DNA sequence: CGTCTATCCTGTGGGC
DNA sequence: TGCCCACAGGATAGAC
């Protein structure tokens, strides 16, 4: 599941490839990908536009375009964004759309290819900077590595919440970019049970949890993301963070802290992995 | 408003 | 071996 570290991995690889280049043409293979746009509308909005910046906000790619519009893309469950040089073999299946980039000094012609077996991924053009801010601010809280995300801000969101703490971490308006993998890993690192009621977290626990969220995300970025099944980076290469999971997807295996078997449960409707002994708080 | 559930979708894998 | 069905889950709409 692409979360912040996976999206950031791709962004870092694609930014030097795409920034400053014009989109020669956009080609949509699957009309679901660009809803609520029509295919024609989407292709017309992008044709000839220059990519000024390839940024990220939470799990969204944000491509700032000349003329003031922006292309916002989300990989959801199984999406991938690849750079496909013109002489490379295009993927045989699940190709939802391509942004064709002409070659320039030192950079080969090719396309940004959106590949997505399960078809949940999205691409949307937002007309203005103001509309973009409105779009993102309605959906996303602070970036985890911004100073505005800290113990007190997390604690504020836990107040009065009966939901399990994991559900709060998965709420993108609390902190942007955490998904199922990194929620499990951050809670383990903080010694907090995923099903603990959010309102019962102490200020100190929120402080610690804010830190372990950043630690887990940073470790994921360092490992170029986690490839459980579908995730590949912009060159089609797997990340390695799945080899460093402490509890996620490790049902029955030894907890790295105490050696007890990692347990799988269901919290907030999601498969959840934790250690009963090390996450009692 | 907070919380929970269904929905979208398709490849995978467990069970028989 | 092959078939069927449950399952995986990010974001969002809708129910309560």
Image: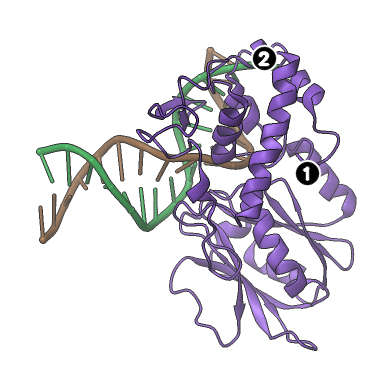
Chain colours: A purple, B green, C brown
| SS under mark 1 | helix
Residue A20's place in the image compared with B7, above or below, is below
Disc 1 with disc 2 on a shared chain: yes
| SS under mark 2 | loop
Q: Residue at x 59, y 39 (%)?
A: A182
| Crowding at mark 2 (Cα within 10 Å: few <14, some 14-19, many 20+) | some
**Left or right: where does residue A40 sit relative to residue A153?**
left
| Crowding at mark 1 (Cα within 10 Å: few <14, some 14-19, many 20+) | some
Q: Nearer the viewer, residue A270 or A92?
A: A270
Which percent across, then down, holds residue A21? 79, 77
Q: Residue at x 70, y 68 (%)?
A: A14
Q: Nearer the viewer, residue A219 or A54?
A: A219
Q: Which mark is residue A42?
A: none
**Left or right: where does residue A114 sit relative to residue C3?**
right
State which chain disc 1 sits on. A
Q: Which residue is mark 1?
A: A136
Q: Which residue is mark 2?
A: A201
**Left or right: where does residue A131 sit relative to residue A58?**
right
Q: Residue at x 57, y 88 (%)?
A: A87
Instruction: State the residue lying farthest toward the front.
Output: A258
Residue A107's place in the image compared with A209, above or below, is below
Residue A211 in sight here: yes
Which percent across, then down, holds residue A145? 78, 42
Distance, label 1 to label 2, CA atoms, is 28 Å
Mark 1 or 2, nearer chain start: 1
Which dot, 1 or 2, sits closer to the camera?
2
Which percent across, then down, holds residue B3? 58, 17
């Amino acid at each position: 599941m692409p979360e912040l570290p996976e999206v950031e991995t791709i962004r870092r690889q694609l930014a030097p490839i795409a920034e400053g280049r014009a989109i020669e043409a956009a080609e949509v293979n699957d009309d679901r990908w660009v809803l609520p746009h029509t295919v024609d509308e989407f292709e017309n909005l992008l044709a000839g536009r220059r990519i000024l910046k390839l940024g990220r906000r939470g799990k969204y790619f944000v491509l700032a375009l000349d003329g003031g519009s922006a292309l916002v893309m989300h990989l959801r469950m199984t999406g991938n964004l690849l750079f496909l040089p013109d002489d490379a073999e295009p993927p045989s299946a699940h190709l939802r759309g391509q942004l064709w980039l002409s070659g320039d000094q030192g950079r080969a012609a090719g396309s940004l290819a959106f590949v997505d077996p399960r078809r949940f991924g999205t691409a949307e053009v937002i007309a203005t900077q103001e509309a973009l801010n409105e779009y993102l601010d309605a959906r996303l809280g602070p970036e985890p590595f911004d100073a505005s995300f800290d113990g007190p801000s997390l604690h504020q969101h836990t107040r009065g919440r009966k939901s399990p703490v994991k559900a709060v971490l998965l709420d993108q308006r609390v902190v942007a970019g955490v998904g199922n993998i990194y929620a499990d890993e951050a809670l383990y690192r903080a010694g907090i049970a995923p099903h603990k009621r959010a309102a019962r977290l102490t200020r100190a626990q929120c402080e610690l949890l804010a830190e372990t969220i950043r630690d887990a995300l940073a470790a994921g970025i360092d490992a170029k993301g986690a490839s459980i099944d579908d995730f590949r980076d912009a060159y089609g290469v797997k990340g390695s963070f799945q080899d460093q999971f402490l509890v996620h997807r490790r049902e029955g295996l030894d907890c790295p802290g105490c050696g007890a078997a990692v347990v799988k449960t269901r919290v907030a409707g999601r498969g959840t992995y934790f250690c009963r002994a090390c996450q009692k708080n």
